[in-house]
Amino acid sequence: MSSTHSSNSRLTLRCQHSPTIGQLSSSKAEVQDSAPSRAKRSLGQNFLVDHNIQRKIVDALGASDMDEVLEIGPGKGALTRHLAGTVRRLTLVELDDILAANLQERFAEHSDIRVLHADVLDVDLGGLFDDLGDVLVIGNIPYNITTPIIFRLLQRPRPRDVVLMVQAEVAERMTAAVGTKGYGALSVGIRTVARVQRLFKVGRGAFRPVPKVESALVRITPRLPEPLCPEEEVRVRKLVRATFQWRRKQLRKILRDHPSLSLDVGRVDAILEDLGIPPEVRPENLTPESFVALSEALG
């Protein structure tokens, strides 16, 4: 859970120019992994120290030497060292100024690596790459800003594939079945534009300092071709956000009374009947496809 976000962050681009490309030796990597650096609680830092888990995460990304990769929150370089020299280009976004400087120094011999000292939520990802649609994203991200990072990555243009370490409870919500307690705005918001898969759990002991929660690795793959036009995406997000704010109320009442919707009840009844959606249904019982259909009908 390395740092990527702060309200007062700045963006600094540090690019490597040495012609030498190669992986760090395992001994140097181990020294760097164990190098003293106090985790900053304000930045949600927990460093991944289990080398087997590091390798499993990188393997899950499946990047080749032809791929361009964005790593969010590289921290001490636990995942970076497995990626360095194995992909066409690697971009690291790290908020912590000390860690960003250490990464710059550590990977100075790699002309295929660039380090950005930045808040990932402030970075123009579309402008950072020639084609974001070809980019793979990986990260052990701060759990306190998981949802903003995910939805930032799902803004257009979107990367080709995303592999992230998240809190296990969040992974459950992302993949929750319709009608279950965990199913909500996060589940629907992701699945209207992407496929999501929970890959494996990671125990607390894989991190230093040891976090209070379990973790899980997830894969998010944006759908192609784009299932919705940009305007439809905005309407669907608005509808999903509003309905789940009142998730225990019946859909008809939400559409009629929610201040961001306030729809005519006669029109609501006609649309629900036309779509075959019971007016007394609650948001947690609507599929992502039903939300899209309802949004389109409401216009």
Image (tube, rainbow, N blue to C red):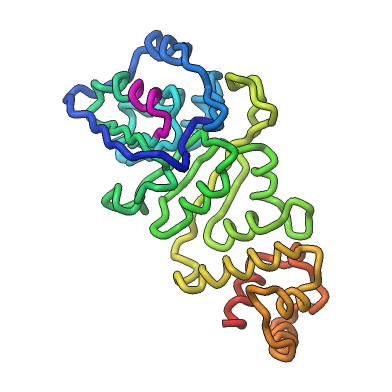
* 186 or 246, nearer to the observer: 246
Side (left or right) of 142 relative to 225: right
Picture residue at 80% right of the left edge, 72% below the top: 250
Where on the picture, by quarter, is residue 284? bottom right
Q: Residue furthest front?
A: 8
Side (left or right) of 10 relative to 43: left
Picture residue at 26% right of the left edge, 32% below the top: 14
Q: Is residue 260 above or below residue 6?
A: below
Which quadrant: the N terminus?
top right
Side (left or right) of 141 relative to 201: left
* 282 or 19, nearer to the observer: 282
Picture residue at 45% right of the left edge, 70% below the top: 230
Q: Is residue 72 above or below residue 82?
A: below
Residue 22, position as x, y percentages in the image:
27, 21
Residue 189 belongs to the span the image colors magenta:
no
Q: The magenta stretch spans which residues? A: 94-103
* 41 or 254, nearer to the observer: 41
Q: Main secondary structure of the magenta part?
A: helix
Where on the picture, by quarter, is residue 214? top right
Picture residue at 65% right of the left edge, 20% below the top: 205
Residue 245, position as x, y percentages in the image:
71, 62
Which quadrant: the C terminus?
bottom right
Side (left or right) of 241 relative to 114: right
- Disc tally is 0
Residue 97, position as x, y percentages in the image:
38, 28
